[in-house]
Image (cartoon, rainbow, N blue to C red):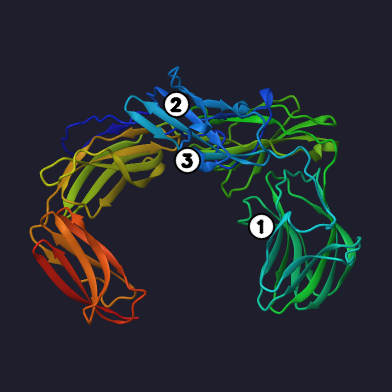
Amino acid sequence: MKKLVFLFSFLITMQLYAQAPDPPFNPMTANGARHISYYNGQWAHILYWQNPTNLIYNDVYISQDSNLVINLDPSVKVLSGIDSSKVFSSLSLEVLGVIDVHTKYYWRVVEYNSFGQTAGPVWYFISQGPFFSYWEDYFYGDLSNYTILQMQGAVWNISNTNFAGGQAPELSFYNSTLVSDTSYLILNSFFDLSSSLNAIDLNYSLDWQSGQYTIGLSYTLDEGLTWQPIWQQDITEDVPANQTFVIVPNENYVKLALYCIDTIPNSAGYWYIDNFLLNSPLSTPSPPAQICANSDSESQKVFLSWDPGSTINPSWGYVIQRKNGLPNSSTNYYQIAWVGPNVLYFEDSTIQLDNIYTYRIQVREGPGGSFRSNWSNEATAYVPAVVPVELLSFASSVDDNGVTLNWTTATETNNSGFNIERKQVHSLQSTVGNQEWNTISFVNGNGTTTEPQTYFYIDENLSSGTYQYRLKQIDFDGTFEYSMTIEVEINPPAKFSLAQNYPNPFNPTTKISWQSPVNSHQTLKIYDVLGNEVAILVNEYRMAGKFEAEFNASNLSSGIYYYKITAEEFVQTRKMILLK
């Protein structure tokens, strides 16, 4: 871990506090990683991650059921170092045996030290699909293998006709809508596809009636959040029965859908589809497996290694692609290298510090390497920086019941930002005992810079008492350092008061502020002009301090209303106007 230099602008006594461990970080199989292999033994994928320092042991949980992992259910604990005081940084999926295809698996690491435990974030990956991506539907049955997302007035159905050029029955779609909209017929299955191995074949015809609409075939990589067309045709007239072949995308974990878009209102017509086939050869090349990506900031490289793929014809080597960010980020992959068939190692020297990169690899074969396998598993590398963050000052000021923290850095490298941590300690002004440190906010850093940077954070609406603050400066690679601790005191108000609501008049929300110099049971109620109680905003015991409540009058009519605060012997009422 880097050295973090602190030069404080005031004298302060350093205080040390026992801390539970920080969470694990930098999983190589990061969120959304696809095509994770599911065989036993040498084919079982290995999960890698990094741990904080000073651990005693850790546990690993993994399951298809995210709730079991979130709740740390003992039934899904697959690895534990408690008996041997061992800290694990990898897990072979061999512990699961043969895992299900095209399935999300959730996993979590729990870290333990002598002061407590910390459950890390819940990560997930997606297992690879079957070796053969195949689909056929002649529409002799129902549409139970599909999910229909249709616009009003549109109908997907099985029709006892043969207008598409096949044999009856066939799939039919009728659109008749007054507005422009899109209807989807989504295949429920997922596919790992290669543009040189798979193709879609279908028969179709169109009985145009009016308007203009577009038919097509689309795919999604995010389970239906966004769709990309791979074939489409604008319809303004009848289309006789014909056959079309559609080239598929070279992607893993793909969903496909037939769709129709009414490009102008009042469009109508029938679309007939039959012999809907996704073809796959009986023998296909296998992509490489267990891609590993490790970064080194000193050499500014990412080192890749992989287990070999297999080919039917002589291999033309491996194509390596990279994207910025995690596997589930929206950035696109791009090719960075094509290496020989006997190469199982690559150094990526085109990286930038303070970045995250995700990699995937495929094998090429056939004439000129024109035949492509599916893509391998995705592996993520986290590229750190090398110089420390130099903190020049860290100061605080108190304004009523708020604390303003100010700090300045001289230089920054790889600075993701600062966790603002706070704890309340026992004092005469507060009845609470010593509390644990809590993260109350995060302030983004400036990455790498040699210019001084100034930061501030305002902690508002605090109860009376004594508070301590510290900064946890975090690098993009997960390493961190704590600042020293500063202490502030929030004094109780000198007198009772109830402020005028703001804004006033209002529609439909307004804020009401008040203060109390004593600990007491407090109520804040709203009344109409007839004296009827219409809302209770506060009814609880509160410490001395300043407070604010929001009143939402969206279910009330315009008019004059009153709000009344009661605390001990103090009672005050003010008028406000709701103007809709």
Task: Please indicate, yes or no, whether residue 21 appears anywhere in the rendered image.
Answer: no
Q: Position of residue 482 (x, y in %)?
A: 30, 34
Q: Under tag 1, what secondary structure?
A: loop
Q: Residues within 10 Å of mark 1 (few under 14, many from 20)?
A: some
Callout 1–callout 3 Cβ contact below 8 Å: no
Residue 155 vs 529, above or below: the answer is: above
- Count of all numbered marks drawn on residues in the image: 3
Q: Position of residue 215 (x, y in %)?
A: 76, 65
Q: Amino acid at mark 2?
A: Asn
Q: Is residue 2 left or right of residue 302?
A: left
Q: Residues within 10 Å of mark 2 (few under 14, many from 20)?
A: many
Q: Amino acid at mark 1?
A: Trp
Q: Which residue is mark 3?
A: 70
Residue 513 vs 119, above or below: the answer is: below
Nearest-to-viewer mark from 1 and 3? 3
Query: Which tag, 2 or 1, sits closer to the chain's start?
Result: 2
Nearest-to-viewer mark from 3 and 2? 3
Q: Under tag 3, what secondary structure?
A: helix
| Quarter containing the C terminus | bottom left
Residue 227 vs 285, above or below: the answer is: below
Q: Under tag 2, what secondary structure?
A: strand
CA separation in Å, label 3 and label 2: 16 Å
Q: Is residue 45 left or right of residue 204?
A: left
Query: Which tag, 1 or 3, sits closer to the chain's start?
Result: 3
Query: Residue at the location (67% across, 31% down)?
Result: 98
- Give 3 or 121, whichever is nearer the viewer: 121
Q: Amino acid at mark 3?
A: Ile
Task: Please indicate, yes or no, whether residue 226 appears anywhere in the rendered image.
Answer: yes
Q: Which residue is mark 2?
A: 58
Query: Which tag, 3 or 2, sits closer to the chain's start?
Result: 2
Q: Which residue is mark 1?
A: 227
